[in-house]
Image (tube, rainbow, N blue to C red):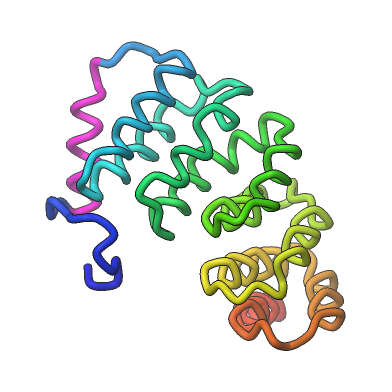
């Protein structure tokens, strides 16, 4: 776990075991309200060990259908910025931000995260359509990538690259045009985008 850079201590439970234990622990839970789901996930994020933080987005994944239109505006920022690192942030984006942005109109919230000075909120904004496939608003994602193209922060550049890589599978011509219109200084993002374009050619 050296790559975690000491962000949080680990109990030492493997991901498969963690999920097995959680399924057993949650088997008898009643259906939560949106607020109960958010408060429970946030309580897990505030515990010291990293496995609890992973359990937070596992919990949201299990009960995502109970999250309402106010869930992200009420709990999203706190969840994303409590003991943040790329692993917990990306897990929360996949299990909470992306599905709820797909279900509800959160354009203003995503714009606010994008305009913040918090790298994890910016990363979440860029990735908010992860997994949408053919429903992806390509122009919107490219707009968010453009806003932060000059960012020097690695985790933002990586998020842009991953977004472009995913778009390359959907509309490679749009990604090529985007790269042609932007300076080549963001090598991290360009490298990921080029991987996506290479895959699209196969």
The C terminus appears in which quarter of the rendering?
Answer: bottom right
Residue farthest toward the left in the current orientation of the protein? 12
Q: Position of residue 51 (x, y in %)?
A: 23, 47
Q: Position of residue 113 (x, y in %)?
A: 64, 47
In the displayed structure image, the side of residue 93 where residue 11 appears, left or right: left
Is 26 part of what is drawn in magenta?
Answer: yes
Report the residue at 24% width, 51% height from top.
15
Q: Which residues are magenta?
A: 14-28
Rendering quarter of residue 194: bottom right
Q: Position of residue 28 (x, y in %)?
A: 24, 15
Query: Is 103 rendered above or below residue 161?
Result: above
Query: Is 106 rendered above or below residue 88?
Result: above
Report the residue at 79% width, 50% height from top.
137
Q: Main secondary structure of the magenta part?
A: helix
Report the residue at 74% width, 58% height from top.
144
Q: Position of residue 185 (x, y in %)?
A: 69, 87
Query: Is 70 rendered above or below residue 108?
Result: above
Asked whether 87 or 132 is in front, the reply is 87
Report the residue at 29% width, 72% height from top.
3
In the displayed structure image, the side of residue 103 where residue 3 appears, left or right: left
The N terminus appears in which quarter of the rendering?
Answer: bottom left
Number of marks drawn: 0
Is 73 part of what is drawn in magenta?
Answer: no
In the displayed structure image, the side of residue 140 where residue 125 appears, left or right: left
Residue farthest toward the front in the current orientation of the protein? 117
């Amino acid at each position: 776990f050296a790559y975690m850079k000491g962000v949080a201590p680990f109990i030492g439970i493997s991901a498969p075991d963690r999920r097995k234990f959680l399924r057993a622990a949650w088997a008898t839970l009643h259906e939560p309200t949106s607020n109960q789901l958010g408060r429970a996930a946030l309580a897990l994020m505030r515990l010291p060990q990293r496995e609890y933080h992973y359990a937070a987005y596992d919990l949201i994944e299990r009960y995502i259908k109970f999250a309402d239109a106010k869930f992200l505006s009420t709990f999203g920022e706190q969840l994303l910025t409590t003991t943040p690192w790329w692993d917990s942030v990306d897990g929360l984006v996949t299990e909470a931000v992306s599905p709820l942005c797909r279900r509800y109109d959160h354009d203003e919230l995503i714009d606010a995260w994008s305009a913040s000075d918090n790298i994890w909120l910016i990363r979440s904004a860029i990735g908010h359509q992860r997994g949408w496939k053919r429903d992806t608003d390509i122009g919107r994602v490219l707009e968010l990538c453009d806003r932060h193209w000059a960012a020097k922060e690695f985790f933002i550049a990586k998020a842009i690259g991953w977004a472009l890589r995913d778009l390359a599978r959907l509309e490679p011509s749009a990604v090529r045009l985007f790269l042609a219109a932007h300076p080549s200084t963001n090598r991290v993002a360009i490298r990921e985008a080029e991987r996506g374009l290479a895959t699209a050619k196969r």
